[in-house]
Image: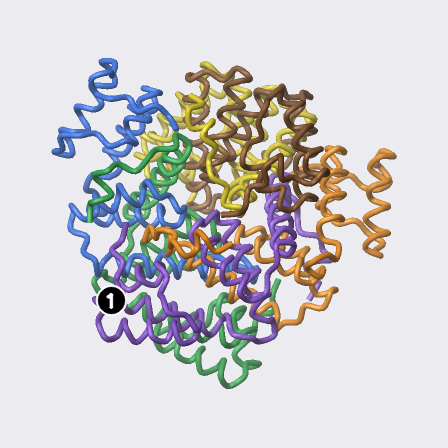
Chain colours: A blue, B green, C orange, D purple, E yellow, F brown
Amino acid sequence: MSTLIEYTDARPEVREVYDDIMATRKADWINNFWKALANDPATLRRTWESIKQIMAPGALDPLTKELIYLAVSATNQCRYCMASHSASARKKGMTDEMLGELMAVVGMANETNVLAAGYQVEVDEQFKSSH
Amino acid sequence: MSTLIEYTDARPEVREVYDDIMATRKADWINNFWKALANDPATLRRTWESIKQIMAPGALDPLTKELIYLAVSATNQCRYCMASHSASARKKGMTDEMLGELMAVVGMANETNVLAAGYQVEVDEQFKSSH
Amino acid sequence: MSTLIEYTDARPEVREVYDDIMATRKADWINNFWKALANDPATLRRTWESIKQIMAPGALDPLTKELIYLAVSATNQCRYCMASHSASARKKGMTDEMLGELMAVVGMANETNVLAAGYQVEVDEQFKSSH
Amino acid sequence: MSTLIEYTDARPEVREVYDDIMATRKADWINNFWKALANDPATLRRTWESIKQIMAPGALDPLTKELIYLAVSATNQCRYCMASHSASARKKGMTDEMLGELMAVVGMANETNVLAAGYQVEVDEQFKSSH
Amino acid sequence: MSTLIEYTDARPEVREVYDDIMATRKADWINNFWKALANDPATLRRTWESIKQIMAPGALDPLTKELIYLAVSATNQCRYCMASHSASARKKGMTDEMLGELMAVVGMANETNVLAAGYQVEVDEQFKSSH
Amino acid sequence: MSTLIEYTDARPEVREVYDDIMATRKADWINNFWKALANDPATLRRTWESIKQIMAPGALDPLTKELIYLAVSATNQCRYCMASHSASARKKGMTDEMLGELMAVVGMANETNVLAAGYQVEVDEQFKSSH
């Protein structure tokens, strides 16, 4: 297990990121993921800056982005990521029904991905020109 | 590569599923995935019935479901699934901007999933009670 | 793409492995996987020796072992491995019906694996003592 | 972690599935996987109906199907699935020797899948026409 | 397949990134990965800036970083990534022997990862305090 | 969880491998991975012999090999493997800075692998002839 860098022990460049995380999220604590990344301040900063930019509203709304994040995390079987991002998604409005349907799609997509590979299905000509 | 079962060569129980796929999708052709599954009619029927039920509107709208499907397929690096479901998603309204943002979230989620695992981050107590 | 080492160009220690592969498999050709591994003769020999030992009859018969191999290869979406091992499995008696049922189980297992992860299911006490 | 729906708290449509699971398995308890899926009754029913159908005897016997299930679960590193399905497999006759050989094949298949990808091996012409 | 944005058709903010890629790499062409990302200029810029920073010399030398990149790409069975990063690694000094040993370690690590999961091995107390 | 075979309970052929592991590693204990594999002595021996051969100095030095091992283990999200191999890597000289940079490369490689797949990028002609 990696050492978790607490706020009080953190170097100024780490504290600066922690402060921005808490301000952006309107939260008064930092979750373990960032405390672990703080072992490598460059990765901490780059990852946080990227996430802040990527998860902001755009052509997709923030809740849809959280649902996509959860879909990836379930597929990768990342326990930490499921725990932290289902909390974020709930804050942004995800209901139990939405999570249930999300997991149904994710399960089915993983099943059909494997069936497509197992049956070695060739891409249809129609899809090649689909854009 | 598995044999693709064409409509004209298909047994009645396979044709029935093909007919339902085309009627549901308002399409006049069947893509290779189903023609491959038709080698095992029970799997063809069960998979189609499940997809039809799961992808229907519910707490999540059909486009959001297609985006989730794409997120899983990119994560699993399933070429066929990316090709076929990006076509479906476009039909349901996905724009280039939406796909761009989807891929940005998917890429970032895969990066942070691995960072969480690599740093062996423990789930925060706050998330355990988050529901 | 890696260079494929043909029999006529192969060093003696590579030829020796090629000869054993053809003799063991009662075949008169070497498939590309081995020709690629031959770039690193130590890996070629070790991999072949391990496969020969592992795939031999034991508590599980050779066909069951090939089915297990296919299950892993479909899950990993390894196109080459599906192509080469479905050929081996057919030689050992795999029928279309068996492949169909195999893929159905593999698809379902991939779906439920992801559901178990996504719902963050804890292992039941009963299973912990199941052995 | 998702809430586990206990039998006494379950809605009638969930109890009906629970009853069928216990009857089919000749068991007097429900494992956590189903109690988690019960948060989404449609997924609970569809998943159970599919598993019941897929794992039934057919061209492959039920033990072989459990072995295939385990092969997928080990490959996906799904702890819950390994725990629950190794219990099922033992009930259907899996011995320690069989599990040992299964894991040997699964490990080797994961190794060779990656070698095939890493060396970017092209599918042999002979395999393309192998069916 | 995504549209590839050629230099002559690219918007100024895309050209700027292309110019920096070519200058940094001392190359006179842009590979397809960047031309595809250019569909989403924000992702193009962020990804390139991150890669430039991460792959620069630091506590690990650039060749070691390329080897690590290749190890991940083989594990993920990403054909494009193997092709492009084995070219970069060769430029930085990777020999055939080094690639052979890399693939041997990668294959073995994938095998033992799965064995550890399949046998559900608990982390030793000694490793918990290993840092 | 699989039974862990302790030295005192081990059969002679298992003890022989345990002795060689401790002698090679200059350690006076056996970690759980080997105690689990010992349930299948043939897999225990073959895996140990392979690892000993593969991880020995060659065209790549032992520390580089451990870094590659860690890159695979983080990508596969194998907790046990991260714990055991980060201990080995530290013994061979891995510093916190090196681990931080390793994880940055691994995270980025996982992100770009998925972007390459999601955008369905074709391999450039230049890379096909890159060897």
Q: Which residue is painted at 37% across and 70% down in the image? A: D28
Q: Nearer the viewer, residue B35 or B114?
A: B114
State whether residue C5 is above or below residue C69: above
For label 1, the residue is B57
On the rendered structure, is A95 left or right of C129? left
At horizontal 52% and vertical 49% (from top left) the residue drawn is D75
> Can the viewer see residue B82 in this picture?
no
Mark 1 surroundings: few (<14), some (14-19) or many (≥20) residues within 10 A:
few
**Is C75 placed left or right of A53 in the picture?**
right
Residue at left offset 37%, top offset 53%: B70
Q: Amino acid at mark 1?
A: Pro
Instruction: Give left or right: position of A82 versus E127.
Output: left
Where residue A70 sits: x, y (%)? Answer: 30, 48
Q: Residue at x 73, y 56 (%)?
A: C58
- Nearest the eye: C63 or B66: C63
Quarter occupied by the N terminus of chain B = bottom right
Please state the horizontal and vertical placement of residue F125, each as a whole percent of the image: 58, 38
Residue E24 visible here: yes
Q: Position of residue D108 (x, y in %)?
A: 64, 46
Image mark 1: chain: B
Helix or strand or loop: what does disc 1 sit on?
loop
Name the residue nearer the viewer: D55 or D128.
D55
| Foreground pick, F43 / B79 | F43
Would you identify the image quadrant in which residue F127 lies? top right
